[in-house]
Structure formats: structure tokens, C-alpha cells
Image: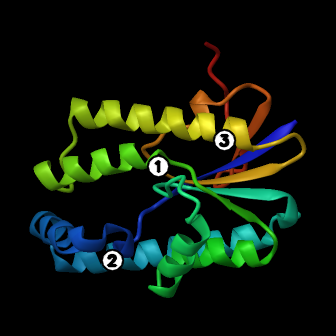
Amino acid sequence: MRKLFNIPIIHTSEDLGSHLVEAKKEYVSKYGLSKWDDHIKAVDKFWRELRETLLALPVDYKNAKLYQDSLPVCDLELEIVEKLAENENINYQILLELVKKGATIMGSEDPKLLIEERNLIIENGVTTLSNVYDDLMERRDSYIAQRINTTLKDEEIGLLFIGALHKVADKLPSDIQVVNLLTRQNSPKEKD
């Protein structure tokens, strides 16, 4: 049996990169600057608590594979994680900490789909959602699920750090036991 901890994440302001200014401007115009500050504090608290939860798991990280939202399959996964960790991105700092405990970083996403998403964001703005974006998310989720299925071996444990809007767990085969880490409950699997 294979096990996958599904970890719905909240993206940090560092994840937005060059889109941070636009996202902050949109958020502040809708909710105000104090709500933006509250949001940043809540995101920081989320990541601190998630780190504590992960480090307390009874997991042999030498037998664990880490799958990260937006991390392309490219043979440079560890270098990307190290660089983003150096840039104070707590998500990637946690990944690097788990790597030091023996976990293996796995590229999770098709680079072509990530470029397609970036182009959609550039053309339409950070907060725009459309049917085109929904289709793209569906294709990304299918790719990530296929990637997990082909790389996670028997008796291995996977940890999937994935944005809350993704539905990767619904696309995994039934021989992968999915545990939603933040609720600590097994997720129901939809049958095809």
C-alpha cells in the first residue's frame, strides 16, 4: 500500500513573485490595508503550524517523496527548492528541512502547463478565473496525479503540498491511501 499525505497549502506572498504588487493592490482595494496585514499574519501562522505538524509526524523521511505545487519536472528540482528557500519562502524552507531528514524532492508538474498558466495570468490578471483556467487546473491535476502514481512506490509515503483549489487526490488510483493532513482524516475516494 502507498500512502499520500494531502497537504492543502496557502500560497505565500513570495509565491506570487512579480505578481505580488498587483495582487496586493487588488486585495487592498477590496478589503483594506489592515485586512492585507491580517492575511499576511494568518498565512505566516499557517506555515509555522504546518511545519510543527510535519516535524511531529511519525514518518521515516528517508522513505518519503515530496510533491510540490508548481514544481516542474526538470532535473533541477532540488536546486529550485534551495533557491526559493534562500529567498525566505517558508514553504520551500520546510521542503528543504524535510530533504535534510532524508526525503526526496520530486518534480510534480508539466512545465508546459505551468508556462500556459503564467501566460494566462499575464494576459488576464492574477485573480481572474475562467473556464479556460478551470480546464488548465484540471489538466495540471491530472498530470500531478499521474506523476505521483508512477513515482510513488509500494511502502513509500508521499507528501503533496498543493493549493486548496486543486483536486489531485480525486484522480489518484485506489491503491494510494490519501490522508488529509490538516484534518487527519482519510479522504473519501470517488469511484470512476
Query: Residue visible at 41% across and 32% down?
Result: 138
Q: Residues within 10 Å of mark 3 (few under 14, many from 20)?
A: many
Q: Nearer the viewer, mark 3 or mark 1?
A: 3
Determine which residue is flagged by label 2.
38
| Element type where label 1 sits in the image | loop
Q: Are marks 3 and 1 in contact (CB under 8 Å)?
A: no
Q: Which residue is mark 3?
A: 148
| Mark-to-mark CA distance, 1 and 2 | 19 Å
For the N terminus, the quadrant is top right
User: Tag 1 or tag 3, which sits nearer the N-term?
Assistant: 3
* Mark 1 lies on residue: 164
Q: In the rendered structure, which amino acid carries the disc numbered 2? A: Asp
If you read the primary sequence from the N terminus, does the residue marked by circle 1 or circle 2 appear first?
2
Q: Neighbour class for label 1 at 10 Å: few (<14), some, many (≥20)? A: few
Of residues 52 and 146, which is closer to you in this image? 146
Asked if residue 186 can be seen in this view, the reply is no
Against 129, residue 93 (above or below) is: below
Distance from Cα at disc 2 to Cα at disc 3: 35 Å
Q: Quadrant of residue 112?
A: top left
The first of marks 2 and 3 along the sequence is 2
**Which quadrant of the rendered structure holds the C terminus?**
top right
Amino acid type assigned to the residue bearing label 1 in the image = Ala
